[in-house]
Amino acid sequence: MAVFLDVVSWLLLSLGGAFVFIGGVGALRMPDLYTRIHAASLTDTMGASLIIAGIILQAGASLASIKLAMILLFLLLTSPTATNALASAALLAGMRPGEAIPWRQDRSE
Amino acid sequence: MYDVVTIATLATMALALVRALLGPSVYDRVLAVNMFGTKTVLLLSVIAFLYGRPDFLDLALAYALINFIGVLAVLVFFRSRALRRAANAGMED
Amino acid sequence: MIVLFGVFLLTLLVITALAIVRSENLFVVVMLAGIFSLLMAAMFLILDAPDVALTEAAVGAGISTVLFLAALALTAERERAGSTNRLLALGVVAVTTLIVIYATFDKPRFGDPAAPVHQHVAPWYLERTPEAIDIPNVVTAILGSFRGYDTLGEVFVVFTAGIGVLFLLGTRPRRNSRSVRVALDESDAGLRHYLIPRVVGRLLVPFIVLFGLYIQFHGEYGPGGGFQAGAIVAAGLILYALLEGEEQALRVMPRWVLTGLVAGGALLYGAVGIAGMLLGGNFLDYSVLATDPIKGQQIGILLIETGVGITVTGVLLSVFHAFAARGRYL
């Protein structure tokens, strides 16, 4: 039973790590701001959920699991909200999809 | 057990740093900092378990909450800058 | 393996520091400073110092970024080209670096139990804490009880810094006739037009304050204490001010409350010390505060940590409102 838990949690952790790394590569290689936001935020949430689930399986039923569940809850709440706020701020400031800098040239960027 | 995920998280932190240094617009850099923040939360949780000290999870929890505030502060700054410029442009007419 | 992780993080730290020095757009510098503080918090955790890491996390990434941005809103966003003699400065720094690196060759290995720093005072603290104070977190025991005078000085330093900033920036915005005042309508303030961040943010503010209180009172058992708790509570209230605008935040916590917090925390700390004297012991001697000396120590540490947390909260909020009121940009 313990070996089974170890194997499952190793799988979850590695999968989460893979998602996180894919997100990092995506944020670097994508051509445009909005595609980068898309890559970074989706893989962020998925990777974080898998990694924290893997650690919870290792921690068993204890105070640490409750704290980890709360970390996951707050990450799920704040990370997509920050992404939404960033994207809408970028849109309102004049970043068009497909261009690298705002079309209304402010004096300093 | 935790080595693979730690290496992946550290590699992603390096990639986010490159994006923060490169990003042509400021929004790329804000995205990089936000990504860096969530990766730091994951790294802190994994290191807490690597050391076998579950009390360290308080740090990860604090960071998950505080990272949000930094990103929102940046957005308030942009909004106020845009409003000030619009008001100045309006008053010059 | 953990050493490799530490070395990798230090490499990222050096790259970030070089980027901070070389870039001239100050906004980029603020973002990179946030990343720098995140890296430092991870490094502190790898070096097994969770209290310091928590303070760095609470102050560096949230509050420092907010204050830097508030200052940037009042000044220019590009560094002015300086005309200093760079070569001389570089030479001095290089020579000093080489001397310091040479001086570290004599240091004992990291974590060596035979090192002098582990021989004299540290074992005494580790042995005395379960006998005299009986709390699991030895750092809080040292900070609060054995070196209580130093912490008294720290609280008064924070207090002085707070009133110094208030003296410099003033508490009321000055009417400057040369600059254009943006008359912000109250309904435009903060992030009021962004619905999703506003709803989620307002949902989070009570949890952040609650978490700050948890860190405050849990400081005797795990990483935590007054400084970290004050920073986290202040961060939560600054989040409210960012979302709803500065005027609404001042209606919720008026300036006289903030000034009261700034002074009240330091007063509480000093009062605990004087209470010790009135009850027959020395200044800041907690053993006389209750019939059982161990209980007295614990009560004393609890009270002074509360004082520290109150002062730190008040000072950070006062500084934030001083910046924000000057710019009238929230």
Image (cartoon, coloured by chain):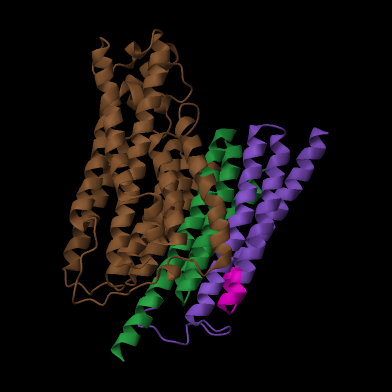
Residue for point 63% across, 35% down: A64
Question: Which is more toward the observer, B63 or C29?
Answer: B63
**Residue C189 versus residue A106 in the image, above or below:** above
Left/right of residue C10 with respect to residue C321 in the rendered view:
right
Say if the magenta span includes residue A36.
Answer: yes
Say which quarter of the image contains residue C277.
Answer: top left
Q: Chain B's colour? A: green
| Residue C104 falls left or right of residue B63 | left
User: Which quadrant is the C terminus of chain C positioned in?
Assistant: bottom left
Whether residue C61 is in magenta: the answer is no
Name which residue lies at 39% across and 68% down: C28
Seen from the viewer's position, the closer of residues C5 and C139 is C139
Q: Colour of chain C?
A: brown
Q: Is residue C136 above or below residue C65?
A: above
Q: Which residue is drawn at 66% across and 62% down?
A: A43
- Give the quadrant of the N terminus of chain C: top right
Residue C59 pos. (x, y %): 39, 48
Residue extent of the magenta highlight: A26-37
Q: Residue furthest bottom?
A: B93
Q: Compared to C26, does C64 lie above or below?
A: above
Does any portion of residue C174 appear in the rendered image?
yes
Q: In front here: A39 or C123?
A: A39
- Let me know if residue C10 appears in the view: no
Q: Answer with the quarter of the image where residue B8 lies.
A: bottom right
Which colour represents chain A? purple
